[in-house]
Each structure stands twice: as structure tokens, then as C-alpha cells.
Image: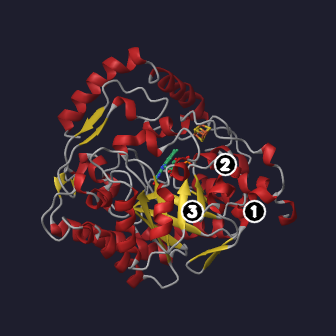
Amino acid sequence: MTAKIESRFKPLFEPIKINKVKLKNRIVMGPMGLSVPTAEGAPSDQAIAFYEARARGGTGMIIISAAATARSADEAPPTTPWLRWDIEENVPKFQKLAEAIHAFETPVVIELMSSFGRLGMPKTMNKIAASPKELTIPEDHFPKGFVIPGGITLSAPKAATIEEIKEVEAGTIQAAERVFRAGFDGVEVNANMSYFTSSFVIQRTNWRTDEYGGPLENRARILINIVRGIRAVTSPDFIIGLRIPANDFLPDGAKAVEFATIAKIVEAEGIDYVALTYGAYETMDRSIPMKDGEMAESGDARVFRKMLSVPIFIQGFHNPELAAKAIAEGHGDVVMLARQLLAEPNYVNKLQEGKTSQIVACDRDQLCMRRMFYGLPVRCSMNPEMGREARIRDGKRRPLKRYFQAPLEHLILLLTAKKWFMTPLMKIVRKILKKIGY
Ligand SMILES: Cc1cc2nc3c(=O)[nH]c(=O)nc-3n(C[C@H](O)[C@H](O)[C@H](O)COP(=O)(O)O)c2cc1C
Ligand code: SF4
């Protein structure tokens, strides 16, 4: 099989180890919150079949989407339901997921969602973040395909007390211990987008005057405590990754050097890789890019590569030639693919077998994101099997309820793409959000 790899793709197949775990190639699946859990927050048959298909397709490592680490995180997500690690009884069910992925010699890590922070629903009436900074997503910063006239402003969270911060730290560490016991290769601590942990990292959302605010070392403290705690309850070989933006594209936000300095401080605690993202919720359009190569063109990824010793995971390289070039030129060590692996689960195998022309390209129409945003099951416009892997694998018929649900979902997607529909709707939505304090 390896003999057919074209020389232009070879950098993607150079051996690499993350901690002590060997990756068979440098293409990793990025996290996507589409894991369709059971009512208890355990992986469903469909979730297992979905990840199994990407492992079978040759993917070098899989990062499973953000999973709630505490009840408060589960109660507050803007979209439900999420995988849950706060429930001990879920451990054996997660074990099955790890085994299904490992069957293809594919390592697997879980992105831990400590709390939704500034994005969280106030269901628990305890929406907390580093400081009370509200979140506004302007109309023109939604990804392509979203029509949200007037944008969205969410209420300011409450500044977390030291006790609440310690509780989040402890919950995340406990969740990581369960991930370890369930046989996963590691966890990814997220400090990206506008979630709880990320609100500490930059001054724009953190103006605390205690040990969690002020100098960089203090703003990194929550990440340091979480990483230190995870290392203590797992093992030296357990992978711990850090997910952090390379640039948030906010005028009063931070750029690569500041984020890389935070990552450097956390690196000293023993992380094994840094996964780079772009943007924040306020600049959501940059997080789900419309074109390839921005992290290389800007030089942002290289800043991290120069400042840190651990492997750097980069994103935004759907085109394998550009991905291989970015690695060869030293912008990063591993390429993360998210949407591209929804559209084409066999991406790596096809590259390896010289069938590049048969790779189904993601067309970036953002249907997957729009479906997730509106709480609909995620599907892909380029891959009709996506989201239906278990049913197809088991040769089952389409469930009867889908004959009613699917046309309704199409209608929702059609109407929410129209300005004449969304303008009055958003006025109502804004009133509701204000009333419920979201
Ligand atoms: C449907 C969908 C769900 C996502 N969910 C998550 C998530 O749970 N956690 C996260 O860190 N990123 C999430 N992302 C962002 C992706 O991991 C990735 O950073 C982004 O899509 C850009 O990479 P791509 O060009 O390879 O798609 C999601 C993206 C999509 C399209
Ligand atoms: S729905 Fe569209 S944007 Fe999303 S993965 Fe499929 S092709 Fe790509």
C-alpha cells in the first residue's frame, strides 16, 4: 500500500509519536460536536459507527468532540445533548468506543469541555467565566450560509468564585481519570473559542485581580492546574493536548505570540501537543474557514512551532498537497481535518492508494454547521452516508419517524436561510433570550 504514496504527499506519512503513541500518518480528525450520545451521555451505536468509519479510512488519530466533564457543563450547552464524563456508569460504554477505534490501530483522544462559560445557557442560572464579559456575535461574523440579522448578544456571565474555579478544575481532572480508565490514549484540554477555560487566557475576557488574573502566568493558572492534576491521576504516557487559538482576530484580543506564550507556560507542565484553532465565537467565521492555508500564509502556526518543543497540530488544509507542503515547510507537525473527514471518511486510504482524484472534497457550504446550530442531526451535503453509518452498517431500514422529521428539517433549513423570515424571527428570539437571561 505504502509504495503507491505519491512523493508530494510523503510528508503526511512521515512517522511521528505523540508522547509514546505512534501515529501511522500525520492526518488527525479534529473534534466536531456531533457525537449523538444516548440520553445518559454515553456513545450511541451511531457514534461508534461514525468514528469507526473514520478509523477504518486510515485516519492517523481521532480527537473526539468536546465532552462535558461536569453536570454543570452538561446543563449549560447551547446545543444538546453532549457526551458526558461526569457519570461513572458511562465508563464501560466509552470503553467500547475506544476499542472500536483501536481495532484499526488508530489512537483516540477526547476533547474535554470543562464548562461552556460565556456561551453557556443559564439553565443552571450559574453562567460563569473569568470575568463578566458578554458575548456578541455580529451578523457578519457568522460562518457562510448563516442568516442572523442583527447578530446575537448573550448576557454577561458571572465572575467565577475561586471555589467555582476549583470545582471546574477538579471535575475536569476527574473526567480525565475516567477517560484514562476507559482505555483512551489521551485528552485534549480546550482553551479555544469562548468557553470557560479560554475566558481566563486573555485580558479581554479576564480582568481579575486574584491569582487567576493579571500576568500571563496567572491567566494560564487554570490550564496549569488542570494539566498538572490530569498528569497526577493518569500516567506519564497518557497524552495531554492543549487546544488554543493561533489568533482570535479581535481588535482587543490576542495574536499568535501571546497565545504561544500561554501554551509555552502550560507546556512546562507536561503537555504532549498543541492543537491550533482560529477565531472565537465573536469571529466564528474565522473558526470555520472558507479557504485553505491561512495558518501557513499568516505565519501564525510557525510562531508556535518556534516557541514550543511539542508537536503542533494545524488546521485549514483540506487539500492534501497544501497540507503536505505546510508540514514540509515547518508550519506544523500534524494536520487536523474536521469537515473534510465528514465528506470523505476514506481520505487517508485514498491518498495512500494513489486514488487522490477519488477523494470527495468538502464544498464548505456549512450545512453541517447550520444543522448543528439549529439542533438538527448533523449531515453532510457531499456524503449521504454521514450520520447514518450505523444504519447502513447494520443493513437497517430508514426509521419511520425520519419520513416526517426530514421534510421538517429541510423546511427549517430553507426558511432560516431567508432574510425575510429571519429578520422578524430574530426580534422574537432576542426578546426570549433577554427574558431567560441568556
Ligand atoms: C459540525 C462541526 C462541529 C464542530 N464541533 C467542534 C467541537 O465540538 N469542538 C471544537 O473544538 N471544534 C469544533 N468544530 C471546529 C472544528 O474542529 C475545526 O476547527 C473547524 O471545522 C475547521 O477545520 P476544518 O476546515 O478541517 O473543518 C466543529 C466544526 C464543525 C464543522
Ligand atoms: S456539509 Fe458541507 S461544509 Fe459540512 S462537511 Fe459536508 S461538504 Fe463540508
Q: Quadrant of residue 255?
A: bottom left
Residue identified by numbered label 1: 10
**Which of the numbered marks, if any, corresponds to residue 332?**
3
Q: Residue shown at 32%/74% (left/top)? A: 224
Q: Quadrant of the C terminus?
A: top left
**Residue 336 appears in view:** yes
Amino acid beneath label 3: Gly
Tell whether 29 sits left or right of 170.
Answer: right
Type of amino acid at the residue the image marks with label 2: Glu
Q: Position of residue 385 (x, y in %)?
A: 68, 42
Tally the numbered discs. Answer: 3
Residue 193's place in the image compared with 263, above or below, is: above
Question: Closest to the observer: 350 or 389?
Answer: 350
Q: Is 366 left or right of 253, judged from the image as shown?
A: right
Q: Helix or strand or loop: what does disc 2 sit on?
A: helix
Residue 66, position in %: x, y?
44, 57
Q: CA distance from mark 3 to mark 1?
A: 15 Å
Q: CA distance from mark 2 to mark 1?
A: 30 Å
Residue type indicated by callout 1: Lys
Q: Residues within 10 Å of mark 1 (few under 14, many from 20)?
A: some
The residue carrying pointer 3 sits among few (fewer than 14), some (14 to 19) or many (20 or more) residues within 10 Å by Cα, namely many
Q: Could you say which is closer to the camera, residue 336 or residue 401?
A: 336
**Residue at 34% over, 61% down:** 258
* Location of residue 26 by image quarter: bottom right
> Residue at label 2?
389
Sort mark 2 into few (<14), some (14-19) or many (20+) by Cα contacts within 10 Å: many
**Mark 2, mark 1: which one is toward the viewer?**
1
Which residue is at 13% across, 68% downward?
Answer: 210
